[in-house]
């Protein structure tokens, strides 16, 4: 990843966007990849710029913030997202989390509060920046074969956990892996664990034939793979690929 973090700004207020751009550009670690006042433009810029961080106002005209989040989640490497919104119910918060939002700030908000949050996100992005695109592509391919829906946050957490298990945290316990993924995602280890389990359960319920190679679980024994089964399976696939690529 480039040493500078690319940020895409999208909000219905042009004045707010200009002020936020001015504040963020004071930090040399950030580069503003683009800004948009409507959802259609935001989606276009997502595909064009492939940002690391998305700051998104949810009341965009033309379409809404949900359509932008859906487009962001469909990218090969979804950006880390900060959502800006007004009143927020617990149900709304859960929906945003399901859509991949890592952080929420209620509007009206202070520009410095947004900038402080972005600096936290910067640390999280850098935490996961060691993961190579080749490794991610391999893991994503295995996840598709297993039938784990890519739009689920649990899929993203599972990918990151497997990459850590195959690399920096090889041999580490699940709690350490969950904690590392949680730190990079601005969430908690328990939420990471639950989200991964949810993604596995959906894949198991959709087509059990896709999961028998994970650990000891199989349709014959009727046991759904555990988080540990799937993380170990994915990490093993990655380690095998790396060994194959080594010269004799």
Image (cartoon, grey):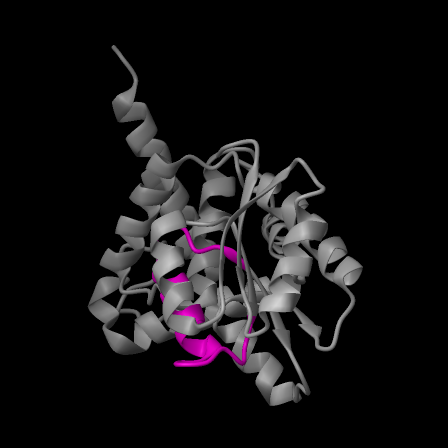
Question: Residue at image x 47%, y 72%?
Answer: 99
Inspect this view and state whether residue 146 appears.
Answer: yes
Q: Is residue 133 above or below residue 46?
A: above
Observer-nearest residue: 2 or 219?
2
Was residue 184 drawn as part of the magenta stretch in this picture?
Answer: no
Residue for point 40% across, 80% down:
63
Residue 200 visible: no
Q: Where is residue 181 in the image (x, y as percent from the top left)?
A: 59, 51
In the displayed structure image, the side of residue 106 where residue 224 appears, left or right: left
From this view, report whether residue 226 is shown above or below residue 59: above
Q: Closer to the camera, 94 or 82?
A: 82
Is residue 65 within the magenta segment?
A: yes
Q: Give the range drawn in magenta.
A: 57-80
Apparent side of residue 144 relative to residue 162 in the rendered image (left or right): left
**Outermost residue to the top:** 248
Q: Position of residue 175 (x, y in %)?
A: 64, 53
> Which quarter of the picture shows residue 241?
top left
| Numbered circles on residues, count | 0
In percent of the image, x 68 and y 87: which residue is there? 87
Q: Residue at x 51, y 41 (%)?
A: 164
Is 156 placed left or right of 27 in the picture? left
Nearer-the-camera pick, 15 or 47: 15
Residue 47 against residue 235 in the figure, above or below: below
Q: In which quarter of the image is residue 193?
A: bottom right
Image coords of residue 58 (percent x, y): 54, 77
106 lies above or below 146: below
In the depicted view, which residue is nearer to us: 22 or 136?
A: 22
């Amino acid at each position: 990843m480039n040493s500078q973090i690319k940020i895409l700004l999208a909000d219905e207020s042009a004045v707010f966007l200009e002020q936020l751009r001015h504040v963020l550009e004071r930090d040399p670690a950030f580069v503003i990849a683009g800004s948009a006042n409507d959802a259609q433009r935001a989606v276009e810029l997502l595909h064009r710029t492939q940002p690391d961080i998305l700051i998104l106002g949810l009341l965009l005209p033309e379409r809404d913030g949900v359509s932008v989040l859906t487009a962001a989640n469909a990218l090969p490497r979804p950006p880390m997202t900060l959502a800006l919104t007004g009143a927020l119910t617990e149900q709304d918060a859960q929906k945003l989390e399901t859509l991949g939002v890592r952080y929420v700030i209620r509007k009206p908000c202070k520009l410095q509060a947004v900038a402080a949050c972005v600096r936290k996100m910067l640390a999280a992005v850098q935490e996961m920046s060691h993961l190579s695109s080749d490794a991610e592509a391999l893991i994503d391919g295995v996840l598709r074969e297993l039938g784990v829906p890519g739009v689920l946050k649990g899929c993203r957490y599972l990918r990151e956990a497997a990459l850590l298990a195959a690399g920096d945290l090889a041999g580490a316990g699940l709690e350490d892996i969950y904690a590392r993924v949680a730190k990079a995602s601005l969430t908690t280890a328990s939420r990471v664990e639950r989200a991964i389990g949810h993604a596995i359960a959906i894949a198991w319920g959709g087509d059990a034939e896709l999961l028998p190679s994970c650990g000891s679980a199989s349709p014959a024994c009727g046991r759904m793979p555990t988080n540990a089964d799937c993380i170990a399976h994915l990490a093993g696939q990655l380690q095998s690929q790396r060994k194959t690529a080594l010269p004799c």
